Image (cartoon, grey):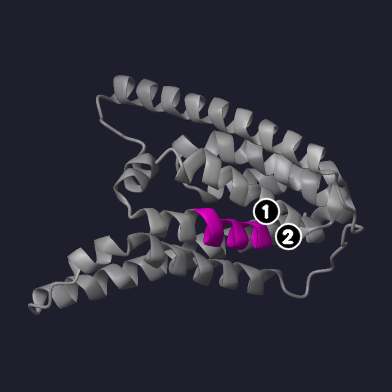
Amino acid sequence: RRVFSRCGWAIFATTLGSLAASLIISIIVGMLDASGIGATDLYNEYLLYINAFVVALGVGIGALVLLGMPKVKAEKRTVPPKVFFMLFAVCYAIGTAGNTIGNLWLTFWNTATGNEVTNQLAELLMAMDPLQMVICTGILAPIMEEFLFRKLLIDRTRAFGELPAILVSALLFGLFHQNFSQFFYAFGIGIVLGYLYCRTGSYLMTTLLHMVFNFVGGVIPS
């Protein structure tokens, strides 16, 4: 219980640190605008880079919370290319199904409450510069997320069984996205990535799969 609670606190610290950094940056931008230095346009232009920075800061804080915890590293193994591509196909199917569930939830929520909540991630990506999407969504996000949610979390919970370690990692990964549009498919993909990490012990392998999925499922369509 102490181990899993500490993992939860690590993700809480990661989220809180990211939100605090975003708030500080927003305040600075507002102060610059108030003083006559137009900063909002620059902020919006480089929003994905700024988001990558605050997430990296949050991941660093979460990693500090996990330092000193005992860990069980998975044995390093390789997987054949056909297995890798099969897992990618599973991720893509889960991503499609999860995105559909998320959109249905938004439709239900908007109908029930009379609000107009939208899929902000999709709208943001559609408006972003393609190079920013490639660097931030296709490269930086998988590197940071796999380091925290697979390598750090699973190594520290694997002693209690691979299934609990994978499920907790996937659940926290889904919750970390902080919206229903992404929660369902992030949770499902987190299970596949956790399975791959436990089978291979390779952070690089899960990062590569995450990158391929983000490129095919997010960057290219946008």
Q: Is residue 36 rendered to the left or right of residue 8? A: left
Q: Is residue 144 rendered to the left or right of residue 164? A: left
Do the residues under discs 2 and 1 have CB atoms within 8 angstroms? yes
Image position of 11 with respect to 23: above or below: above
Identify the residue at horizontal 38%, vertical 60% (top origin). 48
The stretch in magenta equals 138-149
Location of mark 2 (residue): 204
Furthest-left residue in view?
Answer: 36
Q: How many discs appear?
A: 2
Q: Is residue 154 magenta?
A: no
Identify the residue at horizontal 40%, vertical 70% (top origin). 21
Residue 208 badge: 1
Residue 157 badge: none
Furthest-front residue in view?
Answer: 81
Query: Measured from the top left, where is residue 201 in percent x and y?
Result: 84, 56
Image position of 63 with respect to 149: above or below: below
Q: Quadrant of the N terminus?
A: bottom right
The quarter holding residue 68 reads: bottom right
Amino acid type at image mark 2: Leu
Identify the residue at horizontal 38%, vertical 28% (top origin). 106
The quarter holding residue 207 reads: bottom right
Query: Measured from the top left, where is residue 210 in percent x and y?
Result: 63, 49
